[in-house]
């Protein structure tokens, strides 16, 4: 018997466009290249990406802390004006999109009698702000954020913590994500009902090559005998869950 639906957050219910990250690092590079001769855009981007991973794992506590560590990593002296300038030009902080069907989908699933859980690989300050902006905060029964538990998907612990908070067994949960690797992590902890939200612009197939390289570890689908239900958009998820409840 199903008791809960567990969702991935970014990419499944909401999004911070990747273009924001690219614009941010380009803006920052224009600033920092005047402070350090010879620094490259690639070097700055690598440092920013590594620190974002640290921020998402709870090793960095705030946006300001992130900027300060960024300056340390690229060996530029910190000062208030420079820190504030980088914070002001952090383009991605102002970009956030809630998919138009998100609220209705969550409400539909709640009406089916299921609890709602969300897991996310993200810094807690960003997640908390975006949960409030999303308009679904009051509908969600449990959240688990990588920055609070110090592990990211597909590590088993993030799913196990979500199951504990939902007070549900793995066999009672449907997991929904736009990323195949997320589904594999869920499968490894015993969640069998898996839904992959795969719009036409990002169709996933086992072994498919995307832009000359594997987008995800597709072949592990076969190794783990995962058979996710693939839907073209989020709006189809409630109907899939209705079918599971009837079966």
Image: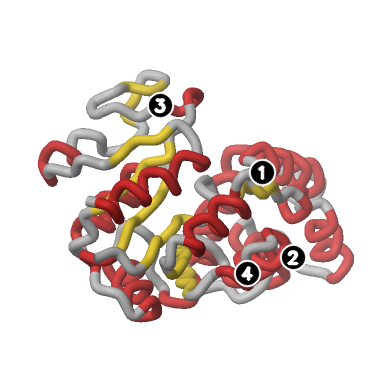
Residue closest to the far right: 81
| Residue 112 picture location, percent across and down | 44, 61
Could you say whether the residue bearing mark 1 is in a helix, strand or loop?
loop
Colour pattern of the rendering: secondary structure
Distance between the alpha carbons at the discs numbered 4 and 1: 16 Å
From the image, tell me which residue sits under label 3. 203
Instruction: Tell me which numbered mark, 4 or 2, is placed earlier along the sequence.
Output: 2
Distance between the alpha carbons at the discs numbered 3 and 4: 29 Å
For residue 40, say whether it is visible: no
Instruction: Tell me which numbered mark, 3 or 4, is placed earlier along the sequence.
Output: 4
**Nearer mark to the viewer, of 3 and 4:** 4
The foreground one among 243 and 183 is: 243
| Residue 136 picture location, percent across and down | 63, 63
| Residue 188 picture location, percent across and down | 19, 59
Q: Is residue 60 left or right of residue 184?
A: right
From the image, tell me which residue sits under label 1. 100
From the image, tell me which residue sits under label 2. 77
Distance between the alpha carbons at the discs numbered 2 and 1: 43 Å
Could you say whether the residue bearing mark 4 is in a helix, strand or loop?
helix
State whether residue 95 is above or below residue 55.
Answer: above
| Residue 170 picture location, percent across and down | 24, 67
The foreground one among 30 and 53 is: 53
- Contact between marks 1 and 3 (CB within 8 A): the answer is no
How many C-alpha atoms fall within 10 Å of the one at disc 1: few (<14), some, or many (≥20)? Answer: few
From the image, tell me which residue sits under label 4. 137
How many C-alpha atoms fall within 10 Å of the one at disc 3: few (<14), some, or many (≥20)? Answer: some
Could you say whether the residue bearing mark 3 is in a helix, strand or loop?
loop
């Amino acid at each position: 018997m199903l008791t809960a639906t567990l969702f991935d957050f970014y990419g499944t219910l909401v999004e911070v466009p990747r273009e924001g990250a690219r614009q941010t690092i380009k803006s920052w590079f224009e600033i920092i290249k005047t402070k350090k001769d010879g620094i490259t855009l690639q070097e700055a981007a690598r440092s920013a990406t590594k620190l974002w991973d640290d921020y998402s794992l709870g090793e960095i506590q705030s946006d300001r802390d992130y900027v300060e560590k960024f300056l340390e990593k690229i060996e530029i002296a910190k000062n208030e004006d420079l820190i504030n300038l980088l914070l002001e030009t952090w383009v991605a902080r102002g970009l956030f999109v809630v998919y138009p069907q998100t609220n209705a989908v969550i409400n539909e699933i709640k009406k089916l009698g299921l609890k709602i859980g969300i897991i996310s690989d993200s810094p807690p300050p960003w997640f908390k702000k975006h949960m409030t902006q999303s308009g679904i905060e009051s509908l969600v029964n449990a959240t688990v954020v990588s920055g609070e538990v110090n592990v990211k998907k597909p590590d088993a612990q993030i799913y196990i913590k979500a199951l504990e908070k939902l007070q549900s067994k793995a066999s009672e949960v449907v997991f929904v994500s736009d990323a195949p690797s997320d589904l594999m992590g869920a499968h490894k902890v015993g969640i069998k009902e898996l839904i992959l939200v795969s719009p036409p612009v990002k169709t996933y197939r086992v072994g498919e090559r995307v832009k000359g390289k594997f987008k995800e570890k597709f072949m592990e689908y076969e190794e783990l005998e995962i058979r996710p239900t693939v839907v073209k958009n989020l709006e189809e998820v409630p109907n899939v869950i209705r079918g599971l409840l009837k079966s």
